[in-house]
Amino acid sequence: MRAVRAGVSDRRDHHAEVVRSRHGGSPRPPARQGSAPRARTPVRALVGDGQPAARHAGAPETGQGRGQGGGQGRDEGARRVTLEAAGFWVVAAVLLASSLAVVLTPNLFHAVLYLAAALVATGVVFLLLDSPFLFAVQLLLYAVGVMTIVVFAIMLTERLVGERITQTSRDLLNGAVVATGVFVGIAGFLIRASPSPPRPPLVADTTPALGRALVGPFAVTFELLALLLVVALLGALYFARTDE
């Protein structure tokens, strides 16, 4: 029965198409069985409504805004590198001047003060190299500890207080020529050398590891340095004693 009904319906459709074609109408396309009607796409979605779409609050900015942000970041990075380089050259100039003053000044006490300035400048170089622990060690051990012992040794030795040292050297010209040659060679090598790649960031703080090394494998060396300072202090007291 279902087959007969399907055949009757097909013949009716065919007869309707023949009649429509005779009267000049366009034939109707056969209907698809089991197909859902197609949804029409809104015209506004295709051509737009003439207004820009609202940007999502969390969407990243593109175009000019992102370009401005990247430019500001690069400017800040370049400014930081310039300030670090300027600070390094200032500290290097102070270190060089104080080191030359140590060996050129005729007053022994003034030479000690210039030496303290050179040690402090060396600590600042460590600080510029992102090593605050070495900066603290440099200040506490050398600029404070060693310099205090040297000052006490000078003050306790009455014969050296206010003493002016006359430094004479027969090979002063030869030394100046050698020093100039070494400086020119090092400067030329640094100028021709390719720039070093950027340093990778430290994965962790190395200060605890350094502390464990000082009280572990290098404990004996650390104690020997402390003993050397004590011997220097005792030597200063020995030379400062009077004949009475």
Image: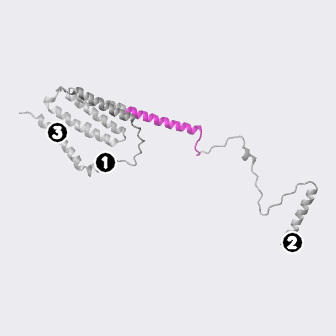
Q: Residue at x 22, y 27 (%)?
A: 172
- In which quadrant will I find the N terminus? bottom right
Left or right, residue 60 beside residue 98: right
The residue singled out by tag 1 in the image is 210
The residue under label 3 is 233
Say left or right for 1 vs 238: right
Q: Nearer the viewer, mark 1 or mark 3?
A: 1
Examine the image and state in which quarter residue 187 appears: top left
Amino acid type, label 2 = Val
The label nearer to you, 1 versus 2, is: 2
Q: Can the viewer see residue 189 in this picture?
A: yes
Residue range corresponding to the magenta coloring: 58-87
Amino acid of disc 3: Leu
Mark toward the viewer: 2 or 3: 2
Q: Residue at x 91, y 60 (%)?
A: 18
Task: Decide whether residue 176 is among the magenta residues.
Answer: no
